[in-house]
Image (tube, helix red, strand yellow):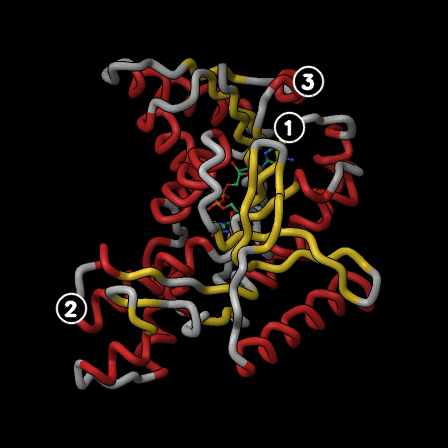
Amino acid sequence: MTKIGVIGLGYAGAAICHALINDSLIDELYIYDLNKNLLMAQRNDLAQAAMINEKIVKVIPAEIKDLFSTDILINTASAKVTTSDRMAELSANKPIILDLFKHFIGYKGIILNITNPCEIITKLIVDATKIDPKRVLGSGTILDSIRLKWAISDIYNIDPNIIDAYAFGEHGVDLIYAFSNTTIAKKPFFTYLKEHNLSYDEETFKDAVVKAGSNIFKVKQRTEYGIANCINFIIRNIIKETKTILCIDAPTNYNGKLIYTARPVIVLQDGYLKDADFTFDEDEKHKYERVEAKFYQVLYLN
Ligand SMILES: NC(=O)c1ccc[n+]([C@@H]2O[C@H](COP(=O)([O-])OP(=O)(O)OC[C@H]3O[C@@H](n4cnc5c(N)ncnc54)[C@H](O)[C@@H]3O)[C@@H](O)[C@H]2O)c1
């Protein structure tokens, strides 16, 4: 019996629930939002949607105490999103998260955060819950990695199935493309481009990947489907212990202090296991060190 909880039933939370009930992997979905009218409306909409599926996932409106029986708890709670600048969400989201997660001290499952700024909020959840950081994860750059895959496929008209793409660092402006580990038809990214006489234009990639979220947000005032499928993918890989490499937020030490960074890691049912065995090039390492320093600054020096 797999029980998943989702906190926050706005755009992202609802889309995640929709992806989860349609994948039929889980058995029960516990949902929670401060807004009780929204909670019941989303519960009814989702429970009715589930009726058409062969396996009917049970959708249960929850109180905080009910969420303690879940295996994985997904956090999407946030103040109303008014900007695509993720770091700018911190001042409004920090008090919400610290106040909400102090109720989860003693929670035994895995917490998976998507609320922005993702790496910082994930660390604040550890502060509030005192849970072992290995069991607190953030969605990090998994969405940016699939956006990179999409961009490569779209820009060069290449079948996405032969592309393995990774992005790391920050789910934000300091996103780093891991081109050293990105391959097309198993060939290193730049080798493939050279062999096929293709050129790389940084601005085109920036617009397609780093600015992907803000380009969507400008029109829709939200992003939802990409993150929903990414969360479902993470959940599937945790439950099945596939040991797939996931570019997500995981704990690390910087100057002797806990921070979270987005990077390729392997997770099991009891949380973060280890970093994937990637070798980054000097430029990528340098950019990553700058990201670590930035998160340390935001968390400990501001
Ligand atoms: N990491 C990613 O890739 C990614 C992708 C999309 C959205 N996001 C982030 O996810 C967050 C949510 O985005 P959204 O578009 O769904 O926002 P939204 O405003 O539609 O939904 C937020 C929900 O949180 C609820 N909420 C607020 N405080 C709560 C509390 N204390 N307890 C329970 N529920 C509470 C609100 O009632 C609301 O329903 C934002 O921070 C957004 O930037 C991250």
Q: Quadrant of residue 22?
A: top left
Tell me if the residue at label 3 has its CB under 8 Å from ligand 1. no
Q: Is residue 110 above or below residue 2?
A: below
Q: Earlier in the sequence, mark 2 or mark 1?
A: 1
Check disc 1 and report the residue beneath it: 109
Q: Amino acid at mark 1?
A: Gly
Tell me if the residue at label 1 has its CB under 8 Å from ligand 1. no
Check disc 2 and report the residue beneath it: 157
Residue 70 in the figure: left or right of residue 28: right
Q: Percent position (x, y) of residue 240?
A: 45, 30
| Residue at figure coordinates x 34%, y 54% from the top left | 220
Cα distance between the residues tagged 3 and 2: 50 Å
- The numbered disc on residue 299 is none
Q: Percent position (x, y) of residue 239?
A: 48, 30
Q: Amino acid at mark 2?
A: Asn
Q: Percent position (x, y) of residue 270?
A: 63, 33
Cα distance between the residues tagged 2 and 1: 42 Å
Q: Amino acid at mark 3?
A: Lys
Check disc 3 and report the residue beneath it: 65
